[in-house]
Image (cartoon, rainbow, N blue to C red):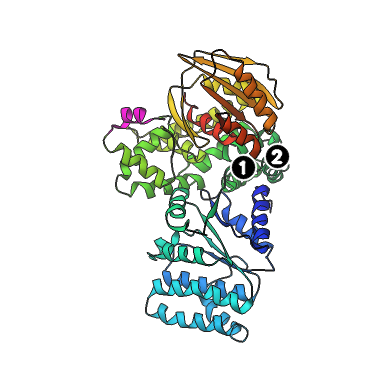
Amino acid sequence: MINLRPELERHLQQRLNAFRDGFRHNLALIGPPGSGKTFQLHQLLGHPEPHALVIYCALYRESCRSFLQRLLCAILQAGSGPTKPGTTSPQLLEALLRHAEPHLPKTAAAIRAIDGLLARRLYGEAFNRALDTVPVLMEERQRPALLILDEFLFLEELGLTHAFHELGKRVMTWPSTLFILASSSPHRARTILRERLQLLFGQFELLTLEALNREAATAWVQHELKGVRGTKTAAPFLIDWLGGSPWYLAVWLKRLKELATLARSAQLTEALFLQTAWDLLGNPDGTLHQWCRSRVDALAHTRQGARALEALIHVASGARTMTELSKRVGRGGLSEALQLLVEHDVAQRSGVCWRVTDPVLRCWLSTVLLSQRADARLPEADVRQRVEQAVRDLWTEWTHAQTRSLSEQVVRLFNRFADDTVALDSKTGRLPKFESISTHEPVGPGAESYLIADGPGRRWCATVQLDPVDENAIAAFDAFCRTQIPRPSRKVVIMKSSIDQNARVVAKAADMWVWSPEDLKVLMELYHHG
């Protein structure tokens, strides 16, 4: 298995090393389904920490009794040796108890006492008592503990209404336990962490799974399509399009290989690529089609769901602002509908601008579902044509972007600004319409160019940085801005790579707006239809 986020793996390992040395910083991994959270947790379990008890429990849609029995199994297994993912089950509990009683008598006795609560269906109390067996185990084994709950938001869906309150109390009062939580519902997870778990002495470091490591992902794609010519061209496109989700990539590559084998083709042709798109995304039996359908069905079955789904389709089709959306779907109930999209993690708001962040869902909504909801449902051949044309357009736009420098792409982006307000880099600012944009030779290190953009009554200065940004680059750009007459109303640092912490502090002191690669991606998506 290739780890497509090696930087994240190193960061997690550093946190574990720090915990071993006495410094605890709880962790929360959030990202959409298929982004690789569970894989990262399994990587940790694959290199067990010898100085700590590792309690790993994944949560599912199941009965409270089943979950609690599995949690108790995980606690017992942690006391007996390294935990292997997927080895806990309710049927194992009695065998594990008999095995633990000779060397973990207090822990085993505490867990046997919980069995009576399960029999009487007192699941809330059983959950509290299950958590409280952790310090008993720590005392018997004389070791600190790692408590890992994968998809922790299911605690409430299981009916454990006070679960987060009880968990929060332990987070605050157990300094010898490192809590690691994971969730596929970023919006709800942030809310729960902020309002119910971020207590005194219990702060969580939020780790969002975003883009994959390009080198690792490229190597993986090329390995998966080994023997198929044209992979070197297709791999970068697939990674840019689907690169936030290893699962999307895996599904796409699997179908590509199957079609290449069936066609006895050693060449990755456009026809093969478009057939893959249709089979997965357009065909009602396709894996990605059914995945997208499940996401909108869950939304549609809620109150205001039908209106929210209508708004979602228009956001995916290019409507960015409330004004645009109200023209298409009407203003009544629109705010509530958009809030529902946020709560279901199918759309995000950046300032006043809205976007569908999932590239596969965005494509499916604007082609397949839009066609199905038209006044006259389109025949399958026409739907297929729309799906294939959408993929061709994505490919064409991506190909053109590869022929342009980053500065040229930024100039095109600036030319599409339309007086929208966005939130980037923890700041909110307006993106004005510009009348002229000029490019200038940079004087600072690592810069591709400096830009001056003029609009009615305002001037922007921007630096496009290819290399990691340091203090010297910020100082040189600030000096350039001071030479401008009139002085710029906004100074923007646009990065292709990263910025060191000292440089960020200097940029903030100089009142600069720093756009990371992810911020730039957001803007590119927002103005894709501009």
Q: Position of residue 15 (x, y in %)?
A: 64, 56
Depth order, front residue of 16/223: 16
Q: Residue at x 64, y 50 (%)?
A: 8
Depth order, front residue of 147/400: 147
- Amino acid type of disc 1? Leu
Magenta range is 320-331
Name, please, the residue furthest toward the bottom. 102
Q: Is residue 498 visible?
A: no
Q: Position of residue 144 (x, y in %)?
A: 62, 69
Relative to 488, is 30 above or below? below
Task: Confirm whether the magenta stretch covers residue 310.
Answer: no
Q: Position of residue 510 (x, y in %)?
A: 58, 28
Q: Is residue 183 visible?
A: yes
Name the residue beneath numbered marker 1: 256
Name the residue beneath numbered marker 2: 228
Relative to 150, is 351 above or below? above
Task: Confirm whether the magenta stretch covers residue 325.
Answer: yes
Q: Tell me which secondary structure the magenta stretch mostly adopts.
A: helix
- Amino acid type of disc 2? Val
Residue 153 numbered tag: none
Q: How many marks?
A: 2
| Left or right side of 301 for 252 | right
Relative to 371, is 84 above or below? below
Q: Disc 2 versus disc 1: distance between alpha carbons?
A: 10 Å
Relative to 469, is 306 above or below? below
Which element is circle 1 on? helix
Alpha-carbon neighbours of circle 2 within 10 Å: few (<14), some, or many (≥20)? some
Q: Residue at x 53, y 49 (%)?
A: 31
Which element is circle 2 on? loop
Name, please, the residue furthest toward the left. 332
Q: Dots 2 and 1: beta carbons under 8 Å?
A: yes
Q: Residue at x 59, y 34 (%)?
A: 517
